[in-house]
Each structure stands twice: as structure tokens, then as C-alpha cells.
Amino acid sequence: MKHLSLLLISIFAIGQSFAFNCHVTPADSLPAYYASIDGTSGKELLSAIQQVAKIGYRTEDFRYDSVWLAYKYTDLRPDGYIWEIYSDCVFEYEKDRTSNTSQTGDCKGYNREHAMCQSWFGTTSLAGKEMSSSKKNSPGSDIFHIYPASYGMNSRRGNRPYGEVLTAANTSGNGTKYGTPVTTKSVTNSIAGAYVEGTITVSTNVLEPADEYKGDIARSYFGTMVKWAGEWAFNKNELGNVIFDATIDADTHYGPENNYGFTDYGLALMLSWHRQDPVSQKEVDRNNGIQKTQGNRNPFIDYPYLAEFIWGEMSGQVLDFDQLLCSADELFELGVSKGYLGEVQDMQIDTILWMVGDTQYNCTYHHHGTKMKNLPEAPSSCSATSTTFMGWTNAPIVDVSADAPIVLYTKAADFPAINTNTAYYAVFAQETTSEIIGQTITLNKADSTDWTLTNLKQQSNNTDGAYWLLVKDASITSPVIDLQTLDSIAMNIRSYQSKTTVSISVDGNSLGTLSAETNSIQRYVWSAPELTGSQSVTFTGINGTASYGVGINAISLYLGGAKATYTNYLTHCDDGPATLLTTPNVNNSIRKIIRNGQLLIIHNGQIYNTLGNNIEQF
């Protein structure tokens, strides 16, 4: 109880100084989180993974001291003690953490262990930027490779590389070894069976983690190196050169072809450890905890088979993201699965029936809880004129004059999760088009029918003839028009006593202005913005007085021509020609909308369905 009280006090202090409240991506949202990497390969895939690995990273406020605080979320065992990877020591989170370099003994305390040693990447970035004392926004504070570790084993390792131990000088309680290395390591590294073999070229001891943490280390290396590629190198001394050939650069292959940053030895070691020790629940939990505290995720923990597309058996292949198995997926067997769909032996195989008329097409899919990547296109089996394939629906359209299906799938993102033995029907549209003639609605001095004129003054002179004067509180309002068809407005206006500007508005909302530049009547044209609805346009003088304003003798509203399309939908191609709605002879243009999957036609302020039935007023 004494220790618990101390811990609660410390947590309260931590909460005041640094808030860990980053959003943790739910497991079912991870496919969308990584969607941008699909369809890429090689360096393009590396670049795409790097961008995802940086999402949410707290570059300014996550510092080296923050690592201590983050361990409460990332590295506590289920029993509440620190999850330490180099020994079987039992450490309390608050009480046993230490930076005391005089501490001796494996179980006397734990500290922050850089799996990628600090001396390997140094204190200067590739661009020459010095690392700050807080190590913020650098590998020095990136918790993905900074583990809580027994001070004794951490101190013993120093800045030596990982490797496989031939003769152990020390072995901890959990099997971690320290000693002389097996100097040569090899791995099969491509789908074609290419063999990669590397050798340690310097005289040094190595640290070999326990088997259950070898994959953890490898995926830390993969994720950290790719994330910092192009910014920091990890081979700035001879011991770093054992594992890393150079950092990954956006434009250059470093080291042996397709090694992407690793030496032959480093690649053989890390890829073999990655395969030997699949992702565990500990890694999944740590990945989520790091996102909560540091803000970003490690792609090689979420989708471990990605490593094979960069360095392994799928190297150089284009990534089909749907074939990857997420470590959070229900089909992923933690500690066993490699992370690709083909390894799941007892996967449910689902059949979807694609119906085109009376023709049935059977397709099978691996069912793993994801949506389809692409929808098939229907064959051109309909012979009716102007028949267009629209998409897929889960129910047949029996009545040829029916409206569009309420649910119509046109792209894979909208398609539901795959259900066993479900039928989907191809939807076709039979269309006809009617040309609607554009028109001009004009106000001039001789005819003001259907226009509303308020408080205008009438003027005349020998040069320009009669005109109206927009003075204070005066306005001109047009008849109601379909604003979507309004292309432009032309006005014959003149300056009168320097009061030169007309405001154009709809329902009190200004659309713009027209300004006269001379004292004689001139024609000015104003292009209308994109508008919707059916309303009147109002013209008002700006800065007018009771006697002075803008002289006007004509206004023209140009309503553009349009095509009205009437569509009937069908899933059977042999039902004969559709009965089409007759186009009325009107001046206003007709337009169509899709609402809740149904095609509707708007005409003269009324809404009709494709059968011509009036549904409601617009």
C-alpha cells in the first residue's frame, strides 16, 4: 500500500506536467489508416510507409524525459510491474527507475535502453541540425526503440550491436546472452530464393535477446529506421556499421541492392528474427500505448508482412493491401501468424453471385472482415439503346419503371462487408435526353411586366433617352427564376452624380456588384456564380440619396440551356423499352437530383419522380 500511494502521487504530478491523451486508432479503423500504401512497391512503398509512420507524432512536446512517464502506458506487465526485456528482474514502475551510472547488478534498477544505440546516430542529423538537450523530434526520444531494461544488462551491452552469441560471458534469467558472436548470418531473402549472407567485420561482443523478444527488436528496427529515413543515419560509428549500411534516402538505394539501409549481416539477422518471433499481444498493447503517448504507430507491428515487401520474399512486388493480415484482426493468431491472408488455413470462403439479367457469375472471396477492394464491372449483355451500367444492388428491380435502388453500390468503399452466398444484381439505366432552350428575361423602359420596381425615380435627357434612377431605398426585383440556370446578367447603366454602383442580391444575400464607369449609358456584363433554388434577383443602388443614384434603362437575365435526362432502371435487359416521362414545353430549365438513391426531377419548383408523379414542392 505504501508503494501504491507513492505511485498515485507521482501519476498526479505527471498528469499536471504532461498529458498523454493522443487518440488510439481502433482496430477496425486500421485498414483505412494504412490505405495510402496500397498499390505501391520498392522505394514508393517505403515512402508511403514512412508517411503513415509519422502520422500524429508529437514532434515538439515528446521529449526524452517523457519516455519515463510513457512507460506507465507502454511497458507495464499485467501484474503492474515493468516489462523488462533483458532479464527476469521484477521492477516497480516508480521506485526502481534509475539513471544512476554507478548502479550495479542486473536487478538493482532499470533505465531507458536505446535498442538503436545513441552513438550510432550521434547528435547531428543528416541536415546538420544538432539534437536538442531534450532530444525532442529525434531518434533520441523515439520510444519505439527505447525499452525499459535492467541497468546491469544495458550497461554490459553498451553500444555493441545485437547478434547471435557463440560463447556467452553472461546469461540473464530470461535467456538474454552477452558474449562473442556467431560472425556469419544468412537468410533466404526473396520469392525467387535469393540468399543473403553477412559477416561481422569488427571484433566485438554482441547481445542476443531472449527468443520471445527477438521479433520485437527487429520490428523496432524496421519501424524506427523507416520513420527517420532521410533525416538521421544509424551508422555513424563502426559498431553501428555492423547492422546499418546507411539510412534510407528518398532518391538513392544505399548499400547492397534492396537492402534499404541494412548491411547484409543486419538484414539477415533482423529478417530472420522477425520471422522467428511473430507479433505478440505485448507488442500490440505497446504499439497502442505508444500511439496514446507519442502519437504515432509502428506499421510493422500492425501489418508485420510489410517487411517481406521491403526486405523479404515479396521484395519489389506491388503491394495488394487486401492480402495483408492485421495483427489486430480476429484471424491473426498472436505469436504464430506471419501476417498474410494465404497462411490462414481454415478461412471461410464466401461466394457472391453476380447476376446480370438471368446470367449468373460466381466469385469467391476470402472472408476476413474487410470490404472489397474493387467492384466487378457488369458484362455488356444488354442490347437496349442507351443502356448504361450503373452499379450493383442487393435486390433485383422487377418493375422496369421503378426508381433507382435505395442502395446502389458504385465503388468498393461503399460495398458492405462480404456475406456468405449473397447475390448482387447489375443495375442498368435506360435514358432519354431532351434539349431545353435557354432564354433571356429582360426588363426595359418600355416593358416591366412581372418585375417589381420600388421607389425608382424616372429621368430623361436628349442623349440617352428615358431611364430609371436607383436612388436611396430604391430597388428592382426580377420574376422568380431557377437560379441554377442563371449564366450572366447584362445591365445598361450610367453614372449619375458619381453614384455608380448597383448591388446584386438574392434573398438579401449579396452576389456581387456592377459599376458604371461613364456618364452615358453603357452595357456591362456580370457572370453569375453557381447558385441553387428558385428565387428572384434584386438590384439596389449603393450610396444613393433621395435625388442621386445609378441610371438604368435595361436589365437582361440570361438563363442557360440545359439537358434534362429521364432514367429508368432495370436489372433484366429483356423487359422492353421503358415508358419515359414526357418533357413539358417550358422556359425554365429542368434539373435532376439523386436523393436517398432515388432519381428525382425538379421542374418549376416541384419535385417529380421518373414516372412523372409529383412528390412535393421544392
Image (cartoon, rainbow, N blue to C red):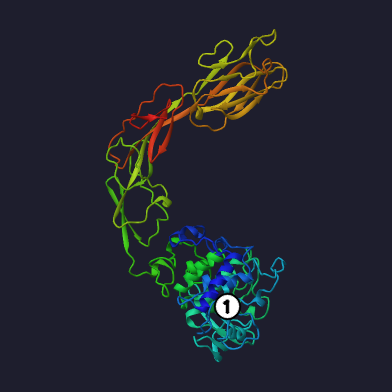
Q: Quadrant of residue 227?
A: bottom right
Percent of width and height locating residue 78: 45, 75
In this image, 582 relative to 72: left or right? left
Percent of width and height locating residue 568: 34, 35
Q: What element carries label 1?
A: helix
Percent of width and height locating residue 498: 72, 20
Percent of width and height locating residue 171: 53, 89
Task: Say if 307 sits above or below 588 in the image.
Answer: below
Q: Is residue 271 visible?
A: no
- Please give the name of the residue rendered at 55% of the width and 86% of the height, measured from the top-left corner: 107
In this image, 66 relative to 431: left or right? right
Task: Say if 508 sits above or below 218 in the image.
Answer: above
Quadrant location of the C terminus in the rendered image: top left
Q: Quadrant of residue 128?
A: bottom right
- Please give the name of the residue rendered at 31% of the width and 30% of the height, measured from the top-left corner: 579
Which residue is labeled 1 in the image? 266
State the residue in front, 11 or 511. Answer: 11
State the residue in front, 441 or 614. Answer: 614
- Please give the name of the residue rendered at 52% of the width and 88% of the height, measured from the top-left corner: 172
The amino acid type, in three-letter code, at marker 1 is Gly
